Image: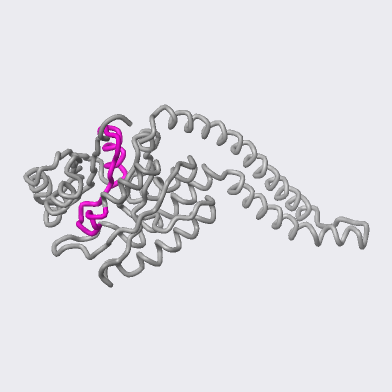
Amino acid sequence: MIGSPSIAAIVPCYNEASAIAKVVADLRAAVPSAVVYVYDNNSTDDTARVAREAGAVVRSEKAKGKGNVVRRAFADVDADIYVLVDGDDTYAVADLPTMIDALVSGPNDHVLGVRRQSTATAYRPGHELGNRGFNWLVSRVFGTRVSDMLSGYRVFSRRFVKSFPALSREFEIETELTVHAMSLRVPQVEVPVGFKDRPSGSESKLRTYHDGFRILALIVALIRHERPFLFYGVIGLLFAVTGALIGLPVVAEFFATGMVPRFPTAILAVGVVILAFMAWMIGLILDGVLKARRELSRLNYLTYAAT
């Protein structure tokens, strides 16, 4: 890349007036060349005014949810390097130069900030355990190890951002970002970053169980879309096992007596086994569709130069 890359720091915000001035100041101090964009997501406090006075470019997204903010920002903002960080002042912005260097020196397309607690209470009860469970599940299914898939602190290349569909509406956006990087097999790296308690007056918008189930539902949907043969293969296997359990007594009785007295059971067993083969065929067909879709995604990704 000729010259210095342009850097855009995107900060999604909702009622963060108590923290946003410090976040903006820290970003400008850590990377003076970066343009800080604060996206106000229907705040009812002075978040927008405080961010503007701190020197940020303030924009508004009326559709509620962090995913909606990220989709809008990725579409509107043009830069070579994109920084995504929450506006609650929990992430160590001082680690940002290290993350940007990891992106550029790779060159990589995705740098994930892996949270390291600087205080014992930085994680809310249940969040750390849930995060570990999701990390394990996604790493196993998609074949790429991830240490902190729910981190809200990331750095991206232009070609990653412009090839990312951003379909999620709320806090599932981190999961979608992680799986997109895995599915497209882009070069990526993890960097440890500091993580601390929220400042006084700032409250978490993440609802442990509600958003946890939404994230789990998204993971299942992404498995169906990105690993269709695995998804429908498991469904087919369940049907096949069920059909065998239903049908084996009928088959055993036929060999013992030469008769099939339970025709409804036999018909049910055959029907369930047919469903198993249908699930496997659906998985094979969608696997072929997936290959074509990934080829198109890859070609779109390659239209942009590396950072």
Q: Quadrant of residue 135?
A: bottom left
Is 192 magenta? The answer is no
Residue 234 as seen in the image, left or right of residue 183: right
Asked whether, in this view, residue 99 is left or right of residue 163, the answer is left
At 9% from the left and 49% from the top, the residue drawn is 46
Q: Residue at horizontal 45%, vertical 41%?
A: 186
Q: Which residues are magenta?
A: 66-95
Q: Quadrant location of residue 249?
A: bottom right
Q: Quadrant of the C terminus?
A: top left
Q: Which one is nearer the viewer's eye here, 77 or 220? A: 77
Q: Position of residue 288 (x, y in %)?
A: 61, 34
Left or right, 69 with reference to 114: left
The quadrant where residue 278 appears: top right
Q: Would you place residue 6 above or below residue 19 in this image?
A: above
Q: Nearer the viewer, residue 279 or 48?
A: 48
Is residue 75 located in the magenta-colored stretch of the structure? yes
Residue sitting at the far bottom: 120
Taking 42 as reference, is 130 above or below it? below
Q: Position of residue 38 (x, y in %)?
A: 18, 43
Which coloring applies here? one colour
Q: In the image, residue 118 lies at what x, y percent?
A: 26, 67
Image quarter where the N terminus lies is top left
Kindly identify the residue that appears in the image at 29 percent across and 40 percent down: 82
- Residue 136, image x, y percentages: 48, 60
Tell me how many marks there are: 0
| Residue at the outermost top position | 303
Residue pictured at 80% horizontal, 59% vertical: 248
